[in-house]
Amino acid sequence: MKIGYMGVTSTFVVPDDLDALTRHPKASQPGEPINLHHTQCHGCGDDAPEGLHIKIFAGDGFTVRARMLVEPRMEGGPGQIHGGILATAFDEVMSHLPLLVGGHCVTAHLQVDFAAGIPVGSTLYFEGRLLGRQRRKLYTEVVAYLADPLVDAGAEAVASGRALFVKIDSARHYAETLANSKAAEQISRRRG
Ligand SMILES: CCCCCCCCCC(=O)SCCNC(=O)CCNC(=O)[C@H](O)C(C)(C)COP(=O)(O)OP(=O)(O)OC[C@H]1O[C@@H](n2cnc3c(N)ncnc32)[C@H](O)[C@@H]1OP(=O)(O)O
């Protein structure tokens, strides 16, 4: 089995020679919700019954803000969020950053640092940031807090994540699996 990518152990290093970033003209404005991937998306979909139902908003510049209620069904260790759920939430929040510059991406690499246990019943607040772009690669990071850092300057960071996204041709990438999606019609309609 291949470990890492192309035989190289994956390490998240943002290159120095980045391309310039430009906000897409149709990107959500700061404070506005960012369009759902689709309504059945496990992370952000309103109609995914077992989904995380994360609410994601555009921030200033190349940032996003998000929040998620840590429900009892998300428990791992007693009374605390499961680490895999937090990793999923991080993936979801960071996957909305490429939408600020346009185009669909998939996660190629994801890493998480867990700094403190996160109690069931809390609301998690996320701040995500696009660190840079090089060709099809977009480098992102996210930090999770137990209070809204916008209103509470003392909000403590409880976890952080980094991910590399790679831009795809969405129609080609999902050509063989779209028919399995509960949202197939909606996605096809959106493509026109
Ligand atoms: C319509 C609604 C859409 C909703 C989207 C929701 C998304 C939510 C976020 C997710 O969870 S996505 C699901 C998890 N991810 C995947 O299923 C992706 C599976 N992997 C792939 O499909 C391919 O490996 C991938 C598209 C990422 C790359 O394959 P390609 O053949 O298109 O590109 P290539 O291998 O040439 O890589 C492009 C660049 O990325 C680099 N790269 C790719 N994977 C890497 C990796 N793992 N680590 C480091 N670098 C990587 C690669 O070295 C290269 O760099 P350079 O530009 O410098 O040449």
Image (cartoon, rainbow, N blue to C red):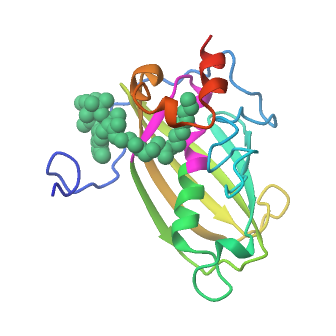
Q: Is residue 178 visible?
A: yes
Question: Residue reaching furthest right?
Answer: 151
Please say if 171 is above or below 72.
Answer: above
Q: Nearer the viewer, residue 15 or 30?
A: 30
Q: Position of residue 67 (x, y in %)?
A: 75, 56
The image quarter in which residue 23 lies: top right
Horizontal side of residue 46 vs 75, given as left or right: right
Horizontal side of residue 11 vs 151, given as left or right: left
Residue in the picture at 58% in, 85% down: 77
Was residue 102 drawn as part of the magenta stretch in this picture? yes
For the image shown, how many numbered marks are present on the structure?
0
- Quadrant, the C terminus: top right
Horizontal side of residue 27 vs 2, given as left or right: right
Horizontal side of residue 137 vs 24, given as left or right: left
The image quarter in which residue 64 lies: top right
| Figure quarter occupied by ligand 1 | top left
Q: Is residue 98 visible?
A: no
Please say if 87 is above or below 109.
Answer: below
Residue in the picture at 78% in, 36% down: 33
The image quarter in which residue 152 lies: bottom right
Question: Residue reaching furthest bottom?
Answer: 78
Q: Position of residue 106 (x, y in %)?
A: 44, 38
- Quadrant, the N terminus: bottom left
Please say if 49 is above or below 63.
Answer: below
Residue in the picture at 60% in, 15% down: 191
Question: Residue reaching furthest top?
Answer: 192
Was residue 162 drawn as part of the magenta stretch in this picture? no
Which stretch appears magenta? 92-108
